[in-house]
Image (spheres, rainbow, N blue to C red):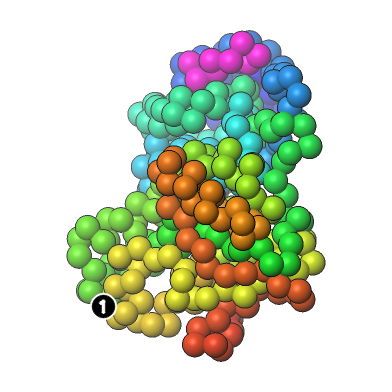
């Protein structure tokens, strides 16, 4: 996170940026390979016999989060999105890089809260900051993170290795974040959906701060034939896995796990099931595995405190079909997409 900026706020100089980095971000760079963020690069070495797994994702104000969201949730969400990708690969996190573009409206209080939240999650997931870049922007705030993990050599779980006959399993619950965004945009929906205050808070929290399933990464590594994290919606991400593996999937919609709040909303407005199956930001993991491994997978997932549900099977063919009462649902927008 050395000073490589070419555009800075009026009156700023390299020393002011250095002070910003030293004050807010250097304390998060606990790995020796980060060199205290005083160099232009970091150096990391995976454990013996391991491959380095790399992923990157970012957030932009007005696109991935509301501009007035709490700064600690913005930083934590940006990191957790990448941690979710690592979890689906069966990888253990080892560090991350961050590039942040700050508008002039950002002040010290905002930065302090942002860094505090980021530091708490870096420690929680044992994933220290290794470096990055800070810039000024005349546009919206943006945060981009590249995260690194490790797996035993050749062991990374891919999208392209699902097999016909595999069970399809998903972690947690689906659709809460999509409903949370709708509630944030229209508070009157809470009454329409007959939600309690606790239900409303739960849905909004799932949007604000996902819970990546890194506790399950080792279980995924040892049991999954293929996996993908659910960032763009269950229907769309499962379809990506099917395309990569050249297989089809048949999913029983009734078996897709929903929270109490999501079930209440769907009971009041049945058409919401499409939004729940295709909306983004669940950050759960879809896993395919051989039927004979399902019992052990369930037991190990329970041991690490992650709920899992079997929702369907992999078959010959192509595409992911979501069946209700034996009929396939047709989605107007099968997956979240920026384009």
Residue 301 among those drawn in magenta: no
Looking at the image, which residue is at 32% across and 79% down? 267
Dot 1 surroundings within 10 Å: few (below 14), some, or many (20 or more)? few
- Residue 322: where, in percent of width, then height? 57, 77
Vertical placement of 42 versus 192: above or below? above
- Prevalent SS, magenta region: helix
Find residue 160 and report its image quarter.
bottom right
Q: Nearer the viewer, residue 62 or 231?
A: 231
- Residue 65: where, in percent of width, then height? 46, 52
Q: Nearer the viewer, residue 269 or 285?
A: 285
Looking at the image, which residue is at 69% across and 67% down? 165
Vertical placement of 246 versus 53: above or below? below
Looking at the rendering, in which quadrant would you find the N terminus? top right
Looking at the image, which residue is at 35% across and 68% down? 262
Find residue 326 and report its image quarter.
bottom right
Residue 302 visible here: yes
Looking at the image, which residue is at 72% across and 49% down? 158
- Residue 98: where, in percent of width, then height? 60, 31
Q: Which residue is mark 1?
A: 192
Looking at the rendering, in which quadrant would you find the C terminus? bottom right
- State the count of labels: 1
Vertical placement of 18 versus 298: above or below? above
Q: Residue furthest front?
A: 292
- Residue 155: where, in percent of width, then height? 73, 39
Q: Which residues are magenta?
A: 27-34
Vertical placement of 69 versus 240: above or below? above
Find residue 6 and report its image quarter.
top right
Mark 1: secondary structure: helix
């Amino acid at each position: 996170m050395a000073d490589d900026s070419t555009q800075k706020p009026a009156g700023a100089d390299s020393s002011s940026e250095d002070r910003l980095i030293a004050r807010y971000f250097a304390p998060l760079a606990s790995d020796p390979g980060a060199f205290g963020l005083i160099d232009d690069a970091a150096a990391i070495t995976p454990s013996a016999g391991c491959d380095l797994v790399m992923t990157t994702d970012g957030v932009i104000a007005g696109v991935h989060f509301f501009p007035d969201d709490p700064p600690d949730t913005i930083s934590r969400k940006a990191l957790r999105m990448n941690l979710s990708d690592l979890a689906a690969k069966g990888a253990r996190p080892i560090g991350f890089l961050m590039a942040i573009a700050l508008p002039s409206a950002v002040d010290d209080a905002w930065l302090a809260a942002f860094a505090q939240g980021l530091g708490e999650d870096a420690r929680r997931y044992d994933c220290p900051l290794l470096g990055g870049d800070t810039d000024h922007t005349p546009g919206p705030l943006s945060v981009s993170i590249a995260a690194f993990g490790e797996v035993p050599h050749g062991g990374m779980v891919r999208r392209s290795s699902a097999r016909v006959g595999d069970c399809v399993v998903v972690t947690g619950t689906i659709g809460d974040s999509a409903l949370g965004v709708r509630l944030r945009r229209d508070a009157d929906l809470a009454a329409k959906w007959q939600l309690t205050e606790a239900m409303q808070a739960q849905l909004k929290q799932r949007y604000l701060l996902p819970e990546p399933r890194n506790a399950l990464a080792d279980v995924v590594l040892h049991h999954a034939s293929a996996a993908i994290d659910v960032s763009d919606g269950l229907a769309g991400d499962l379809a990506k896995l099917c395309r990569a593996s050249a297989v089809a999937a048949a999913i029983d919609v009734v078996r897709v796990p929903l929270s109490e709040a999501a079930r209440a909303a769907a009971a009041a407005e049945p058409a919401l099931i499409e939004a729940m199956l295709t909306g983004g930001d669940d950050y759960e993991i879809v896993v395919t595995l051989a039927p004979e491994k399902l019992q052990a997978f369930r037991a190990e997932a329970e041991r690490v405190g992650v709920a899992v549900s079997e929702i369907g099977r992999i078959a010959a063919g192509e595409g992911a079909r979501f069946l209700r009462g034996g009929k396939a649902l047709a989605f107007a927008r099968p997956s979240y997409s920026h384009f």
